[in-house]
């Protein structure tokens, strides 16, 4: 009986020390308009994919985009800060995971506009999603 009582906590402690990524969710702060439904859906998409999301509703997200120096041609309806990176628009989790794993020397990534079928956007996917880098240089395909 005594062995069973300690086995579970010990197993959990070992698992958490061996797999720290499983113990801690990646934090994201999403700046968006309170009226934007697709932004709300994208926040849910991040949460479903294991992110710990904090939402900052704002009437105008432009100051956030300007603060992070996101070029206007890369803008979408919301901006997220994940780790040290800006993530602009309806970027798929696979691109975010790649960004966080590779840790490139850029400011962030963007999926400009509001493409149909992208995470948070209704409708079928009608085009290939092109994710761009955000940096001091010209945007490049990520």
Image (cartoon, rainbow, N blue to C red):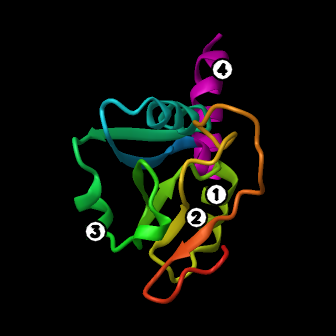
Who comes first in sequence, dot 1 or dot 3? Answer: 3
- In percent of width and height, residue 91 lies at 59, 53
10 Å crowding of disc 1: few (<14), some (14-19), many (20+): few
Which secondary structure lies at badge 4?
Answer: helix
On the image, numbered disc 4 is attached to which residue? 3
For label 2, the SS is: helix
| Region rendered in magenta | 1-22
Residue 78 appears left or right of 134: left
Q: Few, some or many C-alpha atoms within 10 Å of disc 3 (few <14, some 14-19, many ≥20)?
A: few
Give the alpha-carbon distance from disc 1 to disc 4, as whole Å: 40 Å
* Cβ atoms at labels 1 and 2 below 8 Å apart: yes
110 or 27, which is in the foreground? Answer: 110
Q: Is residue 35 above or below residue 106?
A: above
Q: Mark 1 = which residue?
A: 97
Closer to viewer: mark 2 or mark 4: 2
Query: What residue did someone put label 3 on?
Result: 66
Image mark for residue 60: none
- The numbered dot on residue 100 is 2
Q: CA distance from mark 1 to mark 3?
A: 24 Å
Tell me how far mark 4 sits from mark 3, CA to CA.
Answer: 58 Å
Q: Residue at x 45, y 37 (%)?
A: 39
- In the picture provided, is 78 more to the left or to the right than 74? left
Residue drawn 58% across the image and 64% down it: 100
> Mark 2 vs mark 3: which is more N-terminal?
3
Q: Secondary structure at mark 1?
A: helix
Q: Quadrant of residue 46?
A: top right
For the view shown, which residue lies furthest in the bottom direction? Answer: 137
Q: x, y percentage for residue 34?
A: 30, 32
- In this view, the mark in front (2 or 3): 3
């Amino acid at each position: 009986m005594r062995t069973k009582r300690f086995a579970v906590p010990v197993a959990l402690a070992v698992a958490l020390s061996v797999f720290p990524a499983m113990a801690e969710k990646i934090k994201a702060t999403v700046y968006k308009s309170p009226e934007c439904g697709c932004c709300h859906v994208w926040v849910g998409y991040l949460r479903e994919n294991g992110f710990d999301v904090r939402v900052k509703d704002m009437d105008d997200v432009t100051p956030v985009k300007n603060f992070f120096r996101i070029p206007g041609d890369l803008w979408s309806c919301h901006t997220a800060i994940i780790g040290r990176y800006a993530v602009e628009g309806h970027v798929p989790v696979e691109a975010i995971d790649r960004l966080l794993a590779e840790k490139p020397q850029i400011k962030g990534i963007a999926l400009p506009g509001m493409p149909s079928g992208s995470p948070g956007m209704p409708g079928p996917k009608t085009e290939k999603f092109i994710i761009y880098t955000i940096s001091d240089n010209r945007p490049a395909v990520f």
